[in-house]
Amino acid sequence: MQSDYLSYDAIGLAELVKSREASARELLDTAIARAEAVNPAINALVLKDYDAARRRAARNGDGADALAPGPLAGVPFLVKDLGAPVAGLPMTLGSRHYRHFVPTADAPVVTRIRDAGLNIFGKTSTPELGQMPYTEPELFGPCRNPWNLDHTPGGSSGGAAASVAAGIVPLAHASDGGGSIRIPASCCGLFGLKPSRSRQTPGNPPPPPGALGVDLAVSRSVRDSALMLDLLTGDPGLAPGSPGTFLAAAAEPCKPLTIAFVTDPMFAGSLSADVRAALDDAAALAESLGHRIEPVSLSIDFAQAREAFLMLWSVVAEQYVLNAADLSGHRPRRREFEVATWALAHIGRKLGERELPAALDTQRRITTQFADLMTRYDALLCATLAAAPVKIGELRPTQAERLQMHAVTALPMEALMRRLLTEASNKAFAWAGCTELFNLTGQPAMSVPLWWNARGLPVGVQFAAREGNDALLLRLASQLEAARPWFGRRPPLLSARA
């Protein structure tokens, strides 16, 4: 099984189990062996639950603790250590404060994952509270990109993407509140779909203001993500691949589309030569497939949109930091949080409540603007990131920035807070400022791995569609996948340890 494992996506592995060509235990043992071989290098798994997973695999459908007989029964799976509680397993959110927090109930998304028959055997790394577009939590140390260990796998689903790229699992749970599926998918040469806001699995408690985040996965094949969208958000009564499902949509021909070609850097300052080359290549590929490509400049006030996003983001930070006791049961202490997270939470408390209505109003206006634009276009092509994956540590706060962050919490002056928020966000957005708009608007957006630079690093491109039109994106993604296959591309780390 070891030698064949990488040849299959999740659907393919499930078919092996169903046909009894492989057992759930064989797949799990292979996944664990791969994890033990590569995780010391990439640091993607932060929690291992091997024994419980082995028991589930061995039960073969018998007993309450057995794997459900779902469409992905027996496929090994990893859950992101953020926002998706798994009963009985610690959920640290990448933070020292939450390192002893053990949820007692599964999140609705985890319930659906279990119903699909997926076998959860560990959890993947995330930056503290998912706040950063790179995965370097102080609690666990940096997660590394299998394509080049000196570079980031992105964030916040960095551990998930690194695990899939390194061949531990064919797909893994991921979530996206500002690009956290698409950014690591771009960094790691994977497919990553952020579903429409309306596809979000209902949760408890309800989403924070702005409802920026959605759950799905990072995957090596389009059809795996399509099936996961069915399993997490669709009608459980529909058979996989039946008419009306996203899996069926992914298998349908893609009609010729009118695609808006956008080279605006969004919240970033500029796009690198690598990204411009990847965009031009994607536009040419789409045109060769019969699509109409029209260059468009977005008439969006990016500064205002960015400010609104940051206000919503800071309110989320306040919720998980200064109101941490609501979840963990323990009073938050400064030493339990990274300085950037602590500072952002205080900004959220000082400015967020007063400015939240204006931020939500800006979100509504931008959503309307994009809805109007998308009446003229079927899809939109733009950058996922402003540059190729950055090196580990490149975006971390400098000593001078850390001192400023400490000062902001000790002396919470509004002018100082605004300046810090602008300067700190400039650094992150300069690289990862192309995805957040689609979290504001709620549109589906995907990063597609069509291009690698001269250094062998993946550079994804992003497509978006009208809110609710996830099926169109999946049809387009499948067409691109067939025209420019990426499934067989393997990072040097994976090839060396295969």
Image (cartoon, rainbow, N blue to C red):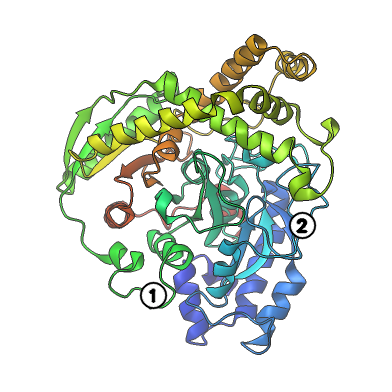
In this rendering, is residue 444 above or below 419? below
Q: Do the residues bearing badges 2 and 1 touch, measured as CB atoms within 8 Å?
A: no
Residue 367 picture quarter: top left
Q: Tag 1 or tag 2, which sits nearer the N-term?
A: 2
The image's mark for residue 240 is: 1
- Res. 376 in view: yes
Q: Left or right: 294 with respect to 90?
A: left
In this rendering, is residue 40 above or below 109? above
Q: Which sits in the foreground, 3 or 382?
A: 382
- Res. 385 in view: no
Label 2 sits on what residue type?
Pro
In this rendering, is residue 275 above or below 176? above
Q: Where's residue 413, x and y in %?
A: 70, 12
Q: Where's residue 495, x and y in %?
A: 55, 55
Query: Residue visible at 46% across and 43% down?
Result: 182
Label 1 sits on what residue type?
Pro
Q: Seen from this angle, which residue lies furthest top?
A: 415
Residue 485 picture quarter: bottom left
Cα distance in 3D space between marks 2 and 1: 32 Å
The image's mark for residue 90 is: 2
Query: Residue visible at 78% across and 41% down?
Result: 139
> On the rendered image, what quadrant is the C terminus found in?
bottom right
> On the rendered image, what quadrant is the N terminus found in?
bottom right
Query: Residue visible at 57% across and 21% down?
Result: 427
Q: Which sits in the foreground, 257 or 15?
A: 257
Query: Residue visible at 52% across and 62% down?
Result: 170
Crowding at mark 1 (Cα within 10 Å: few <14, some 14-19, many 20+): some
Q: Which sits in the foreground, 286 or 226?
A: 226
